[in-house]
């Protein structure tokens, strides 16, 4: 029997959301105070860039540093070269913050897509002037980054601001949960599994009973389907979960909770290419974009179980099966090899071996042996021999 503790980590409770709302009000007041002082209003946005993050080797996570980008409303003389006018972006930032505050006050939430359409309206003009044809947001690719700017500026996840992403990812295993008041047995989820929601905090999802020995995070939904079909989770008493590629926040946060609250080891199974390596590092150390929340998402103890650049030889995969590295793969591999969190000798050896071979391996390459090779031979052998990278 395992019960989750509601106090573990910050949830999306009313208290947390109210605190986020108060920080939005504080932000708004600082803008108003600047205007009353007859100065150019601005918002300081913490920079979500590689140059503004640092790898904390002791904690094993990526942390955000103090660098900011100042977003002005007007372009005044004497400003530093290159800043220019950011009036529209400033206005977009304020309007998104306003909508988030309304959602918090109403105890409501909405999707990223809904928020975009809510603000796909003409920019308001002063009374007596022609109506503007310019829209606040023309495309969702404009609104999504602004939401992230608000998150990091007021130190709150978008779920605490009342904004959520679409459901992505699935999970099955010997675990019983309560989801929004409904008790769900994750061993009886059929072929599709339980859909992992965007908000997975303890006030929404509780762990009631667990017989799981570990968590296996699989990169791809199609490969996860094979593991579910072969009932790998039943044979090995584990939870299997996927996020459809780069795992979304809901999946990462849920895996984090299972690791910390249920004390389950986490193994990550991804393609043998630079993109697979990076997916693993995001799970383990956190992401550059969300460095301000690494402490509640990153799992430093997560283990890379494969695929490895040495697997073709170890498992006798024919030479015609691997795919050649592209120029973009090589560029990305060089970038990743230089990251501070990939500087250990085992990881340098892993990446350099892939570069020397000049090929990459998808998880599906193991189907060249037989369709269940990955569940019946490959992963059981790796687990048995403890052949993973920390």
Image (cartoon, rainbow, N blue to C red):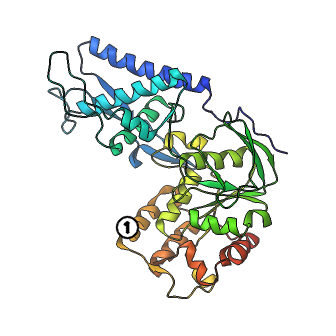
Residue 240 against residue 27 in the figure, above or below: below
User: Residue 39: x and y, percent?
Assistant: 24, 17
Left or right of 167, for residue 121: left
Q: For this rendering, which residue is in front, 200 or 294?
A: 200
Q: Position of residue 139 (x, y in %)?
A: 31, 43
Q: Position of residue 222 (x, y in %)?
A: 57, 66
Q: Position of residue 340 (x, y in %)?
A: 49, 56
Q: Where, quadrant-wise, is the N terminus in this rendering?
A: top right
Viewer-proximal residue among 105 and 188? 188
Marker count (numbered): 1
Front-most of 120 and 54?
Answer: 120
Compared to 219, does 89 lie above or below? above
Q: Which residue is mark 1?
A: 331
For residue 378, say whether it is visible.
yes
Which residue is rendered at x = 24% and y = 24% of the image? 124
Q: Is residue 109 left or right of residue 93?
A: right
Instruction: Examine the rendering and report whether any part of residue 311 can be seen.
Output: no
Extreme residue in the front direction? 190
User: Which image quadrant: the C terminus?
Assistant: bottom right
Neighbour class for label 1 at 10 Å: few (<14), some, many (≥20)? few
| Residue at disc 1, secondary structure | helix
Q: Residue at x 55, y 46 (%)?
A: 249
Relative to 374, does residue 92 appear above or below in the rendering? above
- Report the residue at 60% width, 41% height from top: 296
> Relative to 99, is 113 above or below?
below
In this view, the residue farthest toward the right is: 1
């Amino acid at each position: 029997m395992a019960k989750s503790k509601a106090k573990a980590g910050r949830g999306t409770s009313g208290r947390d959301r109210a605190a986020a709302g108060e920080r939005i009000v504080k932000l708004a007041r600082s803008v108003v105070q600047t205007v009353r002082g007859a100065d150019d209003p601005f918002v300081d946005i913490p920079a979500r860039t590689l140059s503004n993050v640092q790898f904390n080797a002791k904690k094993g996570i990526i942390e955000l540093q103090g660098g900011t980008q100042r977003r002005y409303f007007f372009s005044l003389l004497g400003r530093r070269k290159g800043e220019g006018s950011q009036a529209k972006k400033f206005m977009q930032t304020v309007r998104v913050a306003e909508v988030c505050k309304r959602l918090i006050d109403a105890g409501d939430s909405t999707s990223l897509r809904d928020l975009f359409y809510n603000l796909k309206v003409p920019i308001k003009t002063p009374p007596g002037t022609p109506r503007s044809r310019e829209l606040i947001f023309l495309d969702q690719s404009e609104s999504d980054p602004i939401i992230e700017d608000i998150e990091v500026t007021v130190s709150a996840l978008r779920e605490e601001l009342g904004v959520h992403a679409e459901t992505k990812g699935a999970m099955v295993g010997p675990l019983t949960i309560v989801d929004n008041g409904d008790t769900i047995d994750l061993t009886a989820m059929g072929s599709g599994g339980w859909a992992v929601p965007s908000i997975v905090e303890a006030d929404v999802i509780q762990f009631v009973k667990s017989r799981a020995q570990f968590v296996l995070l699989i990169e791809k939904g199609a490969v996860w389907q094979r593991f579910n079909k072969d009932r790998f989770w039943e044979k090995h008493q584990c939870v299997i979960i996927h996020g459809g590629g780069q795992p979304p926040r809901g999946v990462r946060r849920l895996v984090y909770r299972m690791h910390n609250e249920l004390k389950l080891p986490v193994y990550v199974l991804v393609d043998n290419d630079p993109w697979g390596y990076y997916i693993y590092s995001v799970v383990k150390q956190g992401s550059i974009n969300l460095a301000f929340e690494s402490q509640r998402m990153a799992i430093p103890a997560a283990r890379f179980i494969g695929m490895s650049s040495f697997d073709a030889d170890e498992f006798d995969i024919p030479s015609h099966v691997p795919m050649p590295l592209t120029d973009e793969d090589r560029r990305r591999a060089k970038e990743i090899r230089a990251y501070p969190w990939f500087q250990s000798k085992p990881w340098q050896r892993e990446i350099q071996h892939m570069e020397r071979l000049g090929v990459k391996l998808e998880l599906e390459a193991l189907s060249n042996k037989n369709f269940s090779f990955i569940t019946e031979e490959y992963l059981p052998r790796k687990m048995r021999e403890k052949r993973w990278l920390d």
